[in-house]
Image (cartoon, helix red, strand yellow):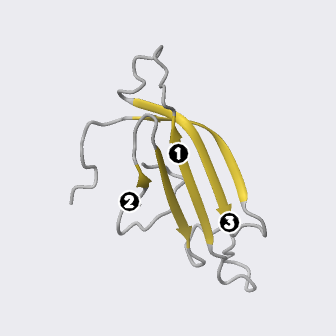
Amino acid sequence: MGSLAFDFDHTLNEFLVNGVFGAGKTITATLPLAEDHPSNPFMHKFHPDHPTGKAISRNIKLVFDTVQDTNDPATGQSQLVGKFQESVSGLHKDSINVAGRFVLKRISLIANLNDQ
């Protein structure tokens, strides 16, 4: 899984997910954002009172629909759809929860994109 919006350890160039990827299955992942991470929104380079940020944690859950859209020939072969849930802690005293629908599209048949 990849996106411009995910911050993770770039020395690994990936992050682990738990669960099973596929129709009717669920995967989960936790993405920690360290206090000193360059994209931490609490770090203010120009403000002496904010030399470091606050630890942030993103808990993501993707629940794939059991029945994929049979009207779309790509569904199940090169794309999967389902429900997205995320809980972000560390930005506010309460966790921030968001949810919605997602579509994942396969863009390559290469088995290993990070071959080193």
In the rendered image, the residue lying farthest to the left is: 116
Closer mark to the observer between disc 3 and disc 1: 1
Who comes first in sequence, dot 3 or dot 1?
1
Say which label, 3 or 2, has the lower sequence index.
2
- Pointer 2 residue: 14
Query: In the rendering, which numbered label is found on residue 32?
Result: none
Report the disc number at residue 62.
1
CA gap between label 3 and label 2 equals 22 Å
Mark 3 and mark 2 residues within 8 Å of each other at the beta carbon: no
Neighbour class for label 1 at 10 Å: few (<14), some, many (≥20)?
many
* Left or right of residue 28: residue 106: left
Q: Amino acid at mark 3?
A: Ser
Q: Which element carries disc 1, helix, strand or loop? A: strand
Question: Quick one: 100 or 26, which is closer to the camera?
Answer: 26
Q: Quadrant of residue 51?
A: bottom right
Q: Position of residue 15 (x, y in %)?
A: 41, 60
Residue 37, compared with residue 73, is above or below; it is: below
Give the alpha-carbon distance from disc 3 to disc 1, as whole Å: 18 Å
Q: Residue at x 46, y 36 (%)?
A: 24
Nearer to us in this view, 22 or 38: 22
Report which residue position mark 3 lands on: 89
